[in-house]
Image (tube, grey):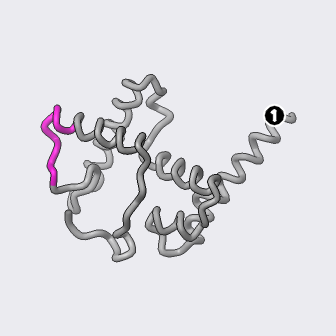
Amino acid sequence: MGETKTAHSKREVPLTGRAMLVLRLLKELHQQNGWYKPNQLLCYDGHQYIEKTAKLSKDLKNLCERAGVEPDRVHPHLLRKTVATVLHEAGMSTRDIADILGHSDIATTEQCYIISTEAEKKRKKMAAVL
């Protein structure tokens, strides 16, 4: 599949059945449109990151529309944040979440995902009271 940005970027990510379904739908969409290449990742082939990421965003919006989800509220990075949040709330350690996300420093995970999630919860609680 090509080289990763760093050695730490190579990792296995456990996926749920629903995640596998979404990936299968994305693969089908790629195959239907002639975009599928079995030897490359869905959004990055080592050379065309920006174009591939933009295409993934477009594909994700199409899938949202098909599923009846507001497409402007979903983007690829939100999926990373959602996974981190769900794993954190399920009790997974920050170190394990960092490993899954490919962060060599858990401070990145804490600052970008865990702390911002906790702050958002506090904001929602305050809004409900006020």
In which image quadrant can residue 108 be found?
bottom right
For residue 31: magenta? yes
Q: Which residues are magenta?
A: 30-38
Q: Secondary structure at mark 1?
A: helix
User: In the visual, does 1 lie left or right of 76?
Assistant: left
- Magenta-highlighted stretch: main secondary structure? loop
Residue 49 belongs to the span the image colors magenta = no
Residue at the spot 56% in from the left edge and 70% down from the top edge: 95
Give how far across and how far down residue 107 sits, in percent.
Answer: 59, 71
Q: Residue at x 53, y 48 (%)?
A: 82
Q: Amino acid at mark 1?
A: Ala
x and y, in percent, of residue 127 in the image: 80, 36
Where residue 25 sits in the image (x, y, percent)? Answer: 29, 36
Residue identifier under label 1: 128
Q: Residue furthest right?
A: 130
Q: Nearer the viewer, residue 96 or 128?
A: 96
